[in-house]
């Protein structure tokens, strides 16, 4: 069973437009949620994470995400896209259950293209 | 500050050959893991380790072996390479272990082609 689902393998936006990348998770306990970004031919780096506390999380490069427990979602947004945002974005979760910790499980990834 | 270092960056193997992908971290992290990245499938966990001398299987462990003799190193061995193991391999480490809420640090990846 898929534990993290990213809706849309490719998203294309114009420069200056809103970026919305969708992520839904399934977990039997309150999850820890992450967004990572991968630029071409590089490793992954952390954009932001939700552990506990405030449900709106701000990350690097102007990105933010909101944890919505009722919708089991953790969508990533940025008000105004920049050409440098073109990359692949991965949603990930740990703590799927009380006896399944320590494993970082990834979604399928969403490739973001930014048009001039 | 090196972080997580993977070698080699690129490798071509013939079917049936064996090899070891190296991974080293200098952050004194207890938790290390190996992933493979394939188009449309995200990153899938191969093996992981919660400390020296302790390893466990992830989602796709078949065809791979690991060991963890030191905190710093976590090599991944391909026993008999198959074309299905053509992929990009990432090593990651983090401070936390079970139920971790801490950031994972990734290496630059090893692009492996099996012909």
Image: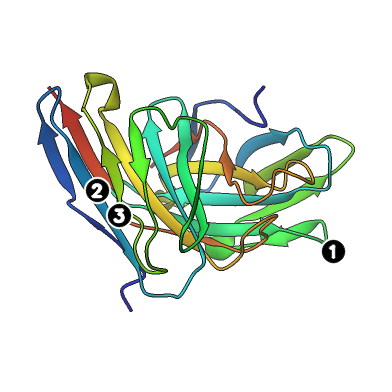
- Using the rendered view, name the quadrant where residue B11 is placed: top left
Q: Residue at 22% across / 20% down in the picture?
A: B83
Crowd rating for badge 1 (residues with CA inside 10 Å; few <14, some 14–19, many 20+): few
The front one of A10 and B12 is B12
> CA gap, disc 3 to disc 2?
12 Å
Left or right: A107, with B38 as reference point: right
Q: Label 1 belongs to which residue?
A: A53
Q: Position of residue B106 (x, y in %)?
A: 41, 57
> CA gap, disc 1 to disc 2?
39 Å
Residue A34 visible to an observer of this rendering: yes
Q: Label 3 belongs to which residue?
A: B108
The numbered mark, 3 or 2, whose residue comes first in the sequence reads: 2
Chain ID of residue with mark 2: B
SS under mark 1: loop
Chain ID of residue with mark 3: B
Vertical comparison of B64 with A65: above or below: above
Crowd rating for badge 3 (residues with CA inside 10 Å; few <14, some 14–19, many 20+): many
Q: Residue at 52% across / 66% down in the picture?
A: B30
The C terminus of chain A sits in image quarter: top left
């Amino acid at each position: 069973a898929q534990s993290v689902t990213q809706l849309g393998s490719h998203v294309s936006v114009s420069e200056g437009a809103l970026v919305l990348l969708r992520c839904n998770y399934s977990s039997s306990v309150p999850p820890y949620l992450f967004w990572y970004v991968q630029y071409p031919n590089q490793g992954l780096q952390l954009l932001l994470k939700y552990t506990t506390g405030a449900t709106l999380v701000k990350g690097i490069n102007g990105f933010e995400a909101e944890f919505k427990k009722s919708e089991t979602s953790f969508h990533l947004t940025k008000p105004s896209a920049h050409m440098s945002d073109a990359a692949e974005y991965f949603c990930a979760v740990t703590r799927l259950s009380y006896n399944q910790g320590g494993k970082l499980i990834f979604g399928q990834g969403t490739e973001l293209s930014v048009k001039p | 500050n090196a972080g997580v270092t993977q070698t080699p960056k690129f490798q071509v193997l013939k079917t049936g050959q064996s090899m070891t992908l190296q991974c080293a971290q200098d952050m004194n992290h207890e938790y290390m893991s190996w992933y493979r990245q394939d188009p449309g499938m995200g990153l899938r966990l191969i093996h992981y380790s919660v400390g020296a001398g302790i390893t466990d299987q992830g989602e796709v462990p078949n065809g791979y072996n690991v060991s963890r003799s030191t905190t710093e190193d976590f090599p991944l061995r391909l026993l008999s390479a198959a074309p299905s193991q053509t992929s990009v391999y990432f090593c990651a480490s983090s401070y936390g272990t079970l139920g971790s809420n801490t950031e994972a640090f990734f290496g630059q990846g090893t692009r492996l082609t099996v012909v």
